[in-house]
Every structure is written in structure tokens, then in C-alpha cells.
Amino acid sequence: MPKYLTLTDYAQITGSAPIKRQTHGWRAKCLQRLVRLDMPVPQTVALSFAVVREIATGAQMNLRHLLGHFPKGQLLSVRPSAEHPEWGGPAAILNIGMNDEMHAQISETHGAAVATALYLRFVQSYAAHVAHLDPDMFDAVEPSMTALHAALREYESEVEEPFPQSPAQQLADVLRSMARAWEGTSARLLRQAKGAPVDAGLGLVVQAMAGGVGIGLSGAGLIRFIDTDTGVPNVMGRFRSDGQHGADALKNGENVLYLTRDPRGPSLEEYCPDAYAQLLEHGRNARQRLREEMEIEFTLDDGKLWVLDAITVQRSSRAAVRVVVDLANDNIILRDEALMRIPPKALSELLHRQVDPRSRPEVFASGIAASPGAAIGRIVFSSGAAQASAARDEACILVRRETTPEDIRGMHAASAVLTERGGMTSHAAVIGRGLGVPCVVGVSRVQIDARRKTLTAGGRTLSEGDVVTVDGTSGHIFLGEVPLLEPALDDRFQTLLSWADARRDIGIRANADTPADARIARDFLAQGIGLCRTEHMFFEDDRLTLMREMIFADTAEDRSDALERLLPMQRADFIDLFEIMQGQPVCIRLFDPPLHEFLPHSKEGLRFLADALGKPLSEITRRAEALSEFNPMLGMRGVRLGVTIPEIYEMQVRAIFEATIEISRRDAHIVPEIMIPLVSAMREVELVKSRIDAAAAAVRSRSGGTFDYKLGVMVETPRAALRAGDIALHASFLSFGTNDLTQMTYGLSRDDAGRFMSVYVQQGVFPEDPFHTLDLDGVGELLRLGAERGRAARDDLTLSICGEHGGNPESIRFCRDLGFDYVSCSPFRVPVARLAAAQLVI
Ligand code: PEP
Ligand code: MG
């Protein structure tokens, strides 16, 4: 037996008796705010979640009391009001109360055309949403008496009852169907995907229809007070007149008006200056009192203004930054609130070109979004071809199975990079982020035929020269040229970040290997370089040859000869970096990668090298094979190279010290930080440290200059984290390299994991790609142990993170909680990190 429900548990929306979002939903709450702002809101009644739930379970309704709030013959609308607007809700139903009698009445007062249009629209939406009939059957084109009669007949034959004439019954049916629609499975899944709890409630708002049928200028409109792309103050929106009377514009057959005076056509400002002025006043008032940029939905009824709704304006990230800075500058919100209102990740949209969200491009393939931003170009399949394109000033997209250090110049030349293999910390990803070049990796469903120069996905084949758009923000590759939005670093962006800097209490440095990276880091106000990967300095043409000579040297003299010639180049690099960073700390990591990475991989390359070094091809090939390893990432790299071939590190530290002296001669001062990679045992640090100390002493005595330096260790192996106590005895800082630390903690190759990572994430094995989001439970535990043990051994120990996770807001929170001094991330992540760090304090 259905329970009998008298609808008394509703609230008439007035300025008093506060309505809560948690009981009546956001729309009801918002309407009450508008009433309190003295906006002309039509008579409204809000039904609570509890009432709507009862309606859904079949309670009988007595609507007399509710209808008593509205004048007889008043047409009504019902709109959904969930706790959050994003959770959606059933479609609004308008013009409830239309029936034969109202049709006759409105025909008399406003003319048959208006009455027929209203009735027909109501029958259509009632049939589709309440009676759940096929909407196509009611899709009449132009409203006419014939169309109306046809729709009423169609309704009757389908439902086997005439179209309901009682407004109370119509309203009861509408309320019931909306309440039930909310309980439907697809609606529930949809809102849960947007974060709604399982038991999320729906409120309904019953409102007097206002406007659209008046004698004078009548219709509906929307007004905003900013440009939603830029945030610049500007009146925007539209007004569509529904009535057929009054304004000249309508006589001319035009029924859409500009809001503000416009040379292109008639405007609301000219036709209804009073209503226009009121709208501006309401906008100002709403901004001031609701502390937001609002968009107002309004109607005019015979020239009288009604406000139906006001919601926060949807806006681009760029506009969002401007809006909050302007609100704070106008003393409407506090700076802290401005900082909290911008999600840090949104800032990366401002730093790079983006695919215009209004475009609907065709996806060719997808992979891991490894370096944000979008670029258009012709596909090429080799670094050489990329350089050739750049020389012709033609934008190109470098397509590779994976990139190796040899591809650096190609990556520099390309507008974007796509690789079939790899994950968030593979070579292409790390370099792409460093250079600010959009990059999608792990595009595993493509086939690359480098010889035929084709790229195939989903049965479609592209050839060299075909144009694609790579979106490193979403991970999609689109066919052809897609409209892009330009980056927008205006003064509001700088202002917001300066407020962030005043609040945050953890340092932000950048990972920068080249002068170009360092300049970006400095421009984004990084507080120094937290990681300079020196091996990236050896891929210039002339240096590569010298490196190769060094690798192929037969004797210690030959090796030192090659290193002597590399020394001035490295020294010049460091002088450059120190100068650009203007006294900010620069942390230089000694050479890390396995030597074979510097050798050519193709037969052709080996032959070329044999020529250049004047050695037989067989010897070059044998040597390359001898250097190759089964697991190079776990092989002779990092400090292992420093221990077994110490001359390389000696050359590097000498270059660092000589650059330091040179800088001090230029009246500047720098204390370089030298970092040893891939340590797993204290003894490694001892050995390298004693050689560095000796090199420092030699430079001091040779130059007669003085300088200090700091020595630190990268914690990249689980053992280094566990033994951080011993290691810290010889290091003034520890920097956690979470790329290798993740690789080694999981035993998961950072270069290959992209192939199956999506399967792992989809099946819930990993909640997220651990190379992308720091694994707080496992890798994080090692960070915690390392930090505790290191600090216990030495309380002035500086702690930091420099893996790719360093720029992620969640990792910054974690590192700050562990008492880290700074995080270091790709230069383009620095603004994101500055804001995220400030939000942790507020
Ligand atoms: C790391 O391993 O986290 C790191 C920063 O070093 P690289 O990525 O150069 O191995
Ligand atoms: Mg590393």
C-alpha cells in the first residue's frame, strides 16, 4: 500500500529560513542566495531530498497545499537540484499547467501562436520525459494547431488516455517521473563517476514560469560578465525573444538580440535599457556578495526582468586565474582563497599550447600523456629527418619505437614526439618534459615501419609527411591539423604565483641540464637547479666524438687526452649554468648512464665511427658488443662507472671547480653542489669523495683561489635508502631519485613498463602508474626510512626529491610531511609545484 504523502516537507524559498545544500540541493540553495540579493526570482518552492525519495517510492501526493503558493492558472517549471551541479539530474520540465483551458485563455491574451507553441512544447516534453514515449513521434517541426492536435492524438493513442488536463495531476506525474529517473541505474552510475556518494539525494525546485509570453519584449537570456576564455571583464551572452509582439527587432523577423550595443544588430541595451541596467547591477552585486563570477539566466516578461538562476561561469584555466586574482585585488576574497581556488594542475594548461576543447578531432591512436602541450606537424621517422625538417622550418612530429640519447637532437628539432614503447620515466618522456616538447609514449597499438616510413593504427596507415596533432596533455594522436589554443602567461599568472611563494614553506627547484632549461627554470622563479644530468651535455656533435674516443681509448693516456679536450667544454657549460642561475644553488649530478649508450646502434653508425676513429670496423663492433649489457639499467652506470673509470668524474669535478673559480673572478659567488648517482654502499661514497677532495685541493693550489662545495648522494636504490644513516655521514645532502627507486623497488623497467601498465591499472593491480604518481606505500616507505635514518645520523642533512614525481602535488605533500627541504622537477612543472606547495600551508 503506498503511503499517503502530504507535501508539507518543502520550503518556500524566501530570504529567511535558511535552505541547505545537503537537504535541498545546490539549485535551491543558490536561488535562496539570489532572493537574499534582492534579485527578482519568481515564486519558488523547494522539495527536499527526503520528500523526493518518498515520491520515488510511490507515495501518494496531495499537491493542493503546494499549489496554493502560486496564483491560479500559473504555469510552473520543475528543475533538478542535486547537492552538486556536476551530479546532474533529470531534464527540467517547463510549462506545467498547460491544458486546453489555458490554451484558450492565452490565445485570447497573447494570441493563438504563442499559446499553441507553449502547449505543443509541453506535450512534447511530457510525452518524452514523463510518459516515456518515443520522442521522435512528437518531434513536430513548426508549432501549429495541426501539429498540436496531432501530438495530443498521438499521446492518447499511445497511452490510451487523453492528455492530462489537471495541473495537479500533471505536476504529480512530473515530480514522480523526475524522482524515479534519479534512481535509475545509468543516472546513478553517471553521478557516481563524478564523485557522488551511493545515497546522493535529489531535491526538486518548483518555480513559477516567468517570461516568454508577455505583450512587450519577452524572452529568455543568459548574461556573463567576463570573457570565458581570457577572464577579461566583458558583457557576453544572448537574448532570444519568444514573444511575437512589442519590439521592432521582432517585426523584422530577428529574434536573437545582442546584449550590449553592437553594430552588427539590435541589442537588449537599446530595446530594454532598464532591464539591461538591472542585469549589470545584479551581476556586480552577485560578484561582490557571492564572491564569484556568475552567469545569470533571466527572462523578460513584457519588459519586466526575472532571474531564474545564477551559476558560476564555466571558464578556461587562464580565465580562472584572472578571475581569482581580480577578486582578491578587489578585496572580495582573500589571497589565500584565490590560491586555493586554482587546481595546480590547471596551470600546466597555461604553459603550453592546448587542443581547443571545442574541437572534435578524430583520434588516430592513444598512449601515455608523458609531456603536456599539443603540437601539429608532419610525421618523420628518424632524428635526421626531424633535423632536416627543422632546417626547412617545417614543423615535424618525431615517431620512434623508443628514443635513445642519440635522438636528443631530433627531439630538439621536433614539435612533438611519439613513441611506441616507454612509460612516464622513459627517455622520451623525461627529455620531452625537460624541453617542454609535447610527448606521448607507450602508444602500443601502433605499428611503426621505419624502413617503409609508415605508421599504422586501427587499420589506417600514415606515411612520412602526413600531418597529425599530438596532444601530450591527453595522450591522444589526432589525424590532421586540430585547432590549438596558445599559452597564456600574463601578469595575473605571475601575481598568483608570487602570492604562492609568500605562503609556501618548501623549496622548489628545477631539473635543468642545459642553459636553455636553466633559463626557463629561472624565468619560472625556481630556487635553483636540483638536478643537472651532465650526461645530457655530451650529445653535441663534437663532444659525442670525443666521448667515443674516450670510450675506445686503449691506454690511460689516450683516455686522459680525450677527457682533457672535454674538460673546457664542460667548464664552459657550468660557467653558463652558474651565470644564468645568478647565485641560486646548482646541483650537478656526475655522469650516470652506461657507456654503450654513447655508441652507435646501427651498422652504418658503427662504420662511420670506425672511419672517424681510424680503427677497423671489426674492432669497433667487438668493443661495442663487449660494452653491451643484459640489463644496462642495473649495470655499469652511475657511481659504478665512477669507481671503475674514475677519470670521468675527475674531469667533471675539475670542470665544476674551475668554473666556480671563474665565477668568483667575475664578482659572483657560488657553492656548487655535486651529487653522486646510483649509490648503494657507503664505501662507494668514500671512494668518490676522496677523489673529489683531491681534485678540489689540486684546483685550489693550481689557481690560488678558494671555494667551497657540497657533496651529496642520490638515493635511487632501495639499499641506499635503507643505509641512509651510513651514507649521510659522508654527504651533506640526499636527493631521492624516485625514477630509479621506483624501478628498483618494483623490479619494473621504467623503459618497458608502458607496454602493460594500462592493463595493470585497468585491472586494479596498481592504483596508478607508479612512475607517474609516487607509490606512497612502498617507494614512499623507503623515502620515509631514508629520511629518518639520514637525519638521525646528521641533523643538518638537506633532503630533497628529484625524480619525475617531484612536481606532483601529492608527492610534494608527502615530501613536506617528511620534512624535506625542497623538491626538484622539470622546469615547466615549477609553477604547478609552487602553487601546490602553497596550498599545503593554507
Ligand atoms: C631518478 O632516477 O629519479 C633520477 C632523477 O635520475 P634519472 O631519471 O636521470 O635516472
Ligand atoms: Mg636515476
Image (cartoon, helix red, strand yellow):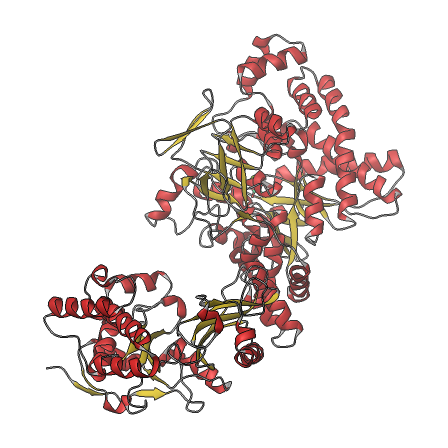
Q: Is residue 431 above or below residue 798?
A: above
Q: Is residue 344 above or below residue 178?
A: above
Q: Nearer the viewer, residue 298 or 714?
A: 298
Location of the N terminus (image quadrant):
bottom left
- Residue at figure coordinates x 61%, y 77% from the top left: 332
Q: On the rendered structure, is 449 left or right of 646?
A: left
In x, y percent, where is residue 837? 60, 61
- Residue at figure coordinates x 16%, y 69% from the top left: 155
Q: Is residue 762 above or below residue 85?
A: above
Q: On the rendered structure, is 474 left or right of 77?
A: right
Q: On the rendered structure, is 134 left or right of 434?
A: left
In x, y percent, where is residue 840? 57, 65
Q: On the rendered structure, is 94 left or right of 730?
A: left
Q: Nearer the viewer, residue 431 or 244?
A: 244
Q: Nearer the viewer, residue 233 or 646?
A: 233
Q: Nearer the viewer, residue 607 or 368?
A: 368
- Residue at figure coordinates x 69%, y 39% from the top left: 514
Note whether residue 594 is visible: no
Location of the C terminus (image quadrant):
bottom right
Q: How many marks?
A: 0
- Residue at figure coordinates x 62%, y 14% from the top left: 608
Instruction: Using the rendered view, name the quadrant where residue 97 is placed.
Output: bottom left
Instruction: Using the rendered view, name the quadrant where residue 816 is placed.
Output: bottom right
In x, y percent, where is residue 387? 62, 27
In x, y percent, where is residue 669? 83, 48
Q: Is residue 656 above or below residue 49?
A: above
Quadrant where ligand 1 appears: top right
